[in-house]
Image: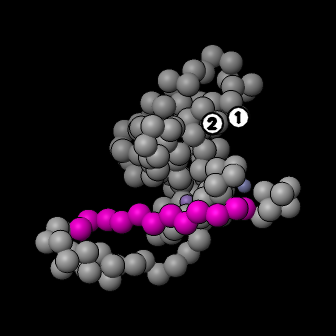
Amino acid sequence: MLNNRLGEAIETLKQTGVRMTPQRHAILQYLISTMGHPTADEIYRALEKNFPNMSVATVYNNLRLFKEAGLVRELTYGDSSSRFDANLMDHYHVICTNCGKITDFEHPSLLDMEQLAESKTGYRVGSHRMEMYGVCPTCQQKQ
Ligand code: ZN
Ligand code: MN
């Protein structure tokens, strides 16, 4: 499963003419294997011991490239760092208000809400984002 997704992602990059480098491969593998939603800084810290010459800027540039190729989604949170999500299936997020952990959950897409928003506002709605906030199981145990 992991190797399939990694293989497909590498193939997609090849088709867009992106050359595979060891760093690029490692960043992609990290994104696909982690079930978290890491920031560029977290990816950098996870990989720096294997790639002493890598910089945070390298990680950022690669993330931008992956995003343009449609391999990851960027989750922005105002002024704080973006998080990157390699789960491309439609899904929603529950976010821990204590530790910031983001957990995926599946639910049929709320497309009827988009239609409702369109009819109420006259906007042409192209996407939506829903997040729920609470305390994750790990933090509940610590409390
Ligand atoms: Zn938590
Ligand atoms: Mn996600």
SS at mark 1 in the image: helix
**Residue sitting at x 54%, y 54%:** 86
Q: Residue furthest right?
A: 142
Q: Amino acid at mark 2?
A: Ile
Q: Which mark is residue 99?
A: none
* Total labels drawn: 2
Q: Residue furthest front?
A: 143
Q: Residue furthest top?
A: 53
Q: Amino acid at mark 1?
A: Ala
Q: Name the dominant secondary structure of the magenta segment.
A: loop
Residue 34 visible within the image: no
Marks 1 and 2, how far apart in space? Answer: 5 Å
| Residue 96, x across and y down, in percent | 65, 57
Which quadrant does the N terminus fall into? bottom right
| Residue 29, x across and y down, in percent | 63, 45
Is residue 134 on the magenta stretch? Answer: yes
Which quadrant does the C terminus fall into? bottom right
Is residue 65 on the magenta stretch? Answer: no
Do the CB atoms of the residues marked 1 and 2 lie less than 8 Å apart? Answer: yes
Ligand 2: give its quadrant. bottom right
Q: Which mark is residue 46?
A: 1
Left or right: where 2 falls relative to 78? right
Magenta highlight range: 125-136
SS at mark 2 in the image: helix
